[in-house]
């Protein structure tokens, strides 16, 4: 089976049009932005799902059986996938990876739109919906806000968790751990409008808006877990080391200078890069692994980070899924070594992570994988909505500074929470 395809011109803002399509959809759908290239998939033609206690290879096996040509899958991996990948005991029997091969798909790039669907009628319907979104102007950024307590909610228990993490590190049990705290959103919010409003004020590496398999989420991802090209080139981009970013040149330059001078932040970043290089070497030809960029500064919404980029070439017999398994979860959202870090996270955090610090993925039939780290996000599941943020703990950490770092990160999202409002559903 093949997708029916049609290419049309687009004069409107693709981000607003894509968000409008998501807002008016009544089915599972995923919007994914990759450096200005936007794609959106809706309605499951096929769904691939694995549990946390099942091998990751099951994903590739199921994708190989998809009965449509030139597919692209959209989906997520939860943090709990790490439990089986790193040999933890009592792996939870929860969904770890869900990918949807959509019935309908829209790809925005360079002023054009590619419409794809399983049936010709669906291509016609997509073109009509696209025209309606352009004609009506679609959704718009909003001024109204829902207030959340990013300053003090759960602050004391977080300080205690950080202190416990510091003690574990100083005992020699591990070198680094990322511990997070949850901040509830007290009322219903409009996820598509929040996404659009927040995206226009953030500078993410990737962004996403999804409703898939019981989860709803939006996010402004600061980094990718992994990128794999069809020819086997692998890229990862660890970010570690954080200071607030205010948009004032003089203040932000002073914070940047302080970031480079802070021994704790520099150490945290350096050991993260070292582990990423080691992990790449397990699946790539060792001589191909290199650090392409080291400890630059990237601005990501209300924070700025020390950032590096590493790459390698898949070794013979290795696949993109092998590389994903080697690098997941991101070192910048788990710890070093990963197994004891994940065990400490499970012990000290009060709520299982789910999508937080997992990944949103697009996977193509030709082996391409792009996996965004799920941070700076809003989550909705089972009637609850919440934010979550963490900080990297090393021996030199202090509970108060790590708490403040979570506040800085939470503001990248909390400032843009728009109260719920109604949209008409697509016919």
Image (cartoon, rainbow, N blue to C red):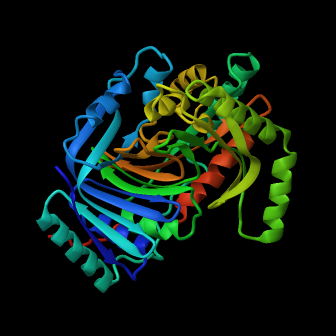
Q: Which residue is drawn at 51% across and 56% down?
A: 206
Q: Residue at x 72, y 27 (%)?
A: 166
Q: Which of 70 and 340 is in front in this view?
A: 70
Quarter occupied by residue 108: bottom left
Q: Which of 45 and 304 is in front in this view?
A: 45
Q: Judge whether residue 244 can be spotted in this image.
A: yes
Query: Does residue 362 appear left or right of residue 115 in this picture?
Result: right
Query: Does residue 392 appear left or right of residue 426 in this picture?
Result: right
Q: Position of residue 167 (x, y in %)?
A: 72, 22
Query: Does residue 214 appear left or right of residue 287 in this picture?
Result: left
**Quadrant placement of the C terminus:** bottom left
Q: Is residue 90 above or below residue 325?
A: above
Q: Position of residue 67 (x, y in %)?
A: 19, 42
Q: Position of residue 328 (x, y in %)?
A: 52, 32
Q: Judge whether residue 393 can be spotted in this image.
A: no
Number of numbered discs overlaid on the protein picture: 0
Q: Is residue 189 above or below residue 296?
A: below
Residue found at the far bottom of this picture: 135
Q: Which of 413 and 35 is in front in this view?
A: 35
Query: Does residue 272 appear left or right of residue 379 in this picture?
Result: right
Q: Position of residue 150 (x, y in %)?
A: 57, 53
Q: Which of 302 and 112 is in front in this view?
A: 112
Q: Residue at x 41, y 73 (%)?
A: 14
């Amino acid at each position: 089976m093949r997708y029916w395809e049609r290419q049309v011109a687009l004069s409107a803002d693709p981000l607003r049009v894509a968000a409008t399509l998501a807002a008016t959809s009544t089915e599972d759908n995923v919007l994914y932005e990759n450096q200005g290239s936007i794609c959106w998939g809706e309605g499951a033609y096929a769904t691939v799902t694995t549990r946390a206690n099942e091998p990751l290879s099951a994903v590739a096996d199921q994708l190989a059986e998809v009965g449509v040509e030139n597919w692209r899958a959209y989906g997520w991996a939860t943090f709990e996938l790490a439990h089986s990948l790193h040999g933890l005991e009592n792996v939870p029997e929860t969904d770890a990876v869900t990918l949807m091969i959509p019935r309908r798909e829209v790809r925005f790039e360079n002023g054009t739109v590619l419409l794809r669907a399983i049936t010709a009628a669906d291509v016609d319907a997509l073109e009509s919906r696209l025209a309606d979104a352009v004609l009506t102007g679609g959704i718009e950024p909003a001024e109204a806000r829902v207030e959340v307590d990013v300053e003090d909610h759960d602050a004391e228990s977080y300080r205690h968790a950080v202190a416990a993490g510091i003690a574990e590190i100083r005992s020699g049990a591990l070198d680094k751990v990322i511990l997070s705290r949850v901040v509830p959103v007290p009322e219903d919010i409009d996820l598509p409008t929040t996404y659009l409003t927040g995206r226009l004020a953030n500078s993410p590496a990737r962004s996403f808006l999804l409703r898939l398999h019981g989860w709803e989420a939006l996010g402004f991802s600061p980094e990718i877990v992994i990128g794999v090209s069809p020819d086997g080139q692998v890229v990862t981009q660890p970010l570690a080391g954080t200071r607030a970013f205010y948009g004032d040149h003089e203040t932000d330059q002073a914070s940047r200078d302080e970031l480079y001078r802070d021994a704790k932040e520099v150490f945290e970043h350096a050991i993260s890069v070292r582990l990423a290089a080691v992990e790449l070497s397990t699946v790539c030809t060792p001589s191909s692994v290199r650090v392409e960029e080291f400890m630059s500064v990237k601005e990501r919404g209300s924070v700025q980070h020390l950032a590096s980029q590493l790459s390698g070439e898949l070794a013979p017999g290795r696949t993109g899924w092998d590389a994903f398994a080697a690098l997941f979860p991101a070192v910048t959202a788990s710890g070093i070594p990963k197994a004891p870090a994940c065990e400490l996270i499970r012990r000290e955090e009060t709520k299982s992570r789910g999508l937080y610090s997992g990944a949103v993925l697009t996977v193509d039939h030709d082996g391409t994988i792009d996996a965004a780290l799920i941070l700076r996000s809003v989550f909705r599941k089972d009637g609850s909505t919440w934010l979550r943020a963490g900080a990297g703990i090393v021996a030199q950490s202090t509970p108060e500074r790590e708490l403040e770092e979570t506040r800085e990160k939470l503001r990248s999202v909390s400032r843009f929470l728009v109260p719920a409002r109604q949209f008409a559903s697509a016919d």
